Image: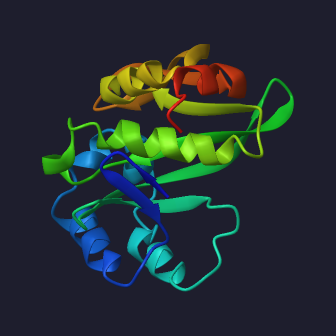
Amino acid sequence: MKNGNIVLRYIKESDIDNYVRWTTVETEWQNWDAPWEWLEDDDFDFVGCRRSELGKDPGFYSRLEIETTDGDHVGWVSCYNFYYEGKEVLAVGLDIPATGHRGKGLGQDALTLYLAHLFSKHDVLYTQTWSGNAPMIRLAEKIGFAEVLRLKDIREVRDEKYDGLTFSINKNDFLKRHTHL
């Protein structure tokens, strides 16, 4: 799948080196993507989980790698289920650990393409973040997500309290805004 300057694809062996680097050297992205999880679970083998995905059928693309059209692996998109208003719903996420590739619209291209794919089976999609993650909040709003839930002071990051945020977008609103897909 291609949109703008990115391609979404399955994981491949050469991506593992990037995951090792992103969990040992270039770790700044962990300050934004649920940083409390990185502090709470030091036994979690993030690279091992990625390695275990090699060669497996990912089903309905629950996780895809983001690659530039120049062939640089820069991050991933993923989805997960959670409960909202008494029913199980699907939320999407995005990470671009490669700091040199941020601020160039790659995240917007990747998430928009991923949403277009997921909307082939869903009528409403969600994303969740925390009030300290201004880049993700801006991206969600730019794509057309609207805040639907704010849980006050439920996250603590670097000794400060932050709100938990849930956003949603419905298929019709998304398609009106993103007619190029």
As displayed, is residue 127 above or below residue 110?
above
- Left or right relative to 91: residue 104: left
Q: How is the image coloured?
A: rainbow
Classify residue 130 by image quadrant: top left
Camera-side residue of 54 and 45? 54
Q: Residue at x 31, y 69 (%)?
A: 19
| Residue 74 on image: x %, y % | 28, 58
Q: Is residue 79 visible?
A: yes
| Residue 67 on image: x %, y % | 33, 61
Extreme-right residue of the structure: 86
| Residue 61 on image: x %, y % | 62, 61
| Residue 5 on image: x %, y % | 30, 49
Camera-side residue of 65 and 39? 65
Camera-side residue of 149 and 74? 74
- Left or right relative to 153: residue 103: left
Q: Is residue 132 visible?
A: no
Q: Residue at x 41, y 80 (%)?
A: 12
